[in-house]
Image (spheres, grey):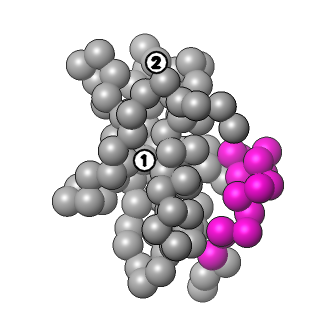
Amino acid sequence: MEKNPHTVTDNTARHRYELELDGDVAILEYEEQPGCRILTHTIVPPRFEGQGIGRELVEAALQDIRDRGLRFRPLCSFIIRYVERHPEWAALVDKGR
């Protein structure tokens, strides 16, 4: 995995990861459950679509989840597709209810 050029922060008060982009913010929203983050929605501002911003956001969020010893449940279609293309993250997927 290559180093991402942007910094992603976990805004726990708003339950989302944020990546600031020249006055805009890309976000990955989540819900908390014991031992698991449910990844619900990813938004990249239209002018930044197709530039790998969503990938950076997801990679940083998943690495943070791994570092915290958590699992994740992807509900967002973008994240589901990402994990399908990057099976190295599949072991962290919580199959849930």
Tell me if residue 90 is in the magenta stretch.
Answer: yes
Q: Note whether 92 is above or below 61 in the view shown.
A: below
Residue type at mark 2 is: Phe
Quarter of the image containing the C terminus? bottom right
Residue at the image point whose x is 31% and y is 29% from the top:
20
Identity of the residue furthest to the left in this view = 13
Residue at the image point whose x is 51% and y is 73% from the top:
70
Say the numbered circle drawn on residue 15.
Answer: none
Number of labels in the image equals: 2
Q: Quadrant of residue 87?
A: bottom right
Tell me if residue 44 is in the magenta stretch.
Answer: no
Q: Tag 1, which secondary structure?
A: strand
- Mark 2, other Cα within 10 Å: few <14 / some 14–19 / many ≥20: some
Tell whether label 2 touches label 1 (CB within 8 Å).
no
Q: Which residue is mark 2?
A: 48
Q: What range is drawn magenta here?
A: 81-94
Q: Is residue 96 left or right of residue 90?
A: left
Residue at the image point whose x is 74% and y is 63% from the top:
90
Q: Note whether 84 is above or below 52 in the view shown.
A: below
Q: Tag 2, which secondary structure?
A: helix
Image coords of residue 44 (percent x, y): 44, 30
Residue type at mark 1 is: Leu
Residue at the image point whose x is 76% and y is 48% from the top:
86
Q: Which residue is mark 1?
A: 28
Q: Is residue 61 left or right of residue 9?
A: right
Image coords of residue 32 (percent x, y): 38, 73
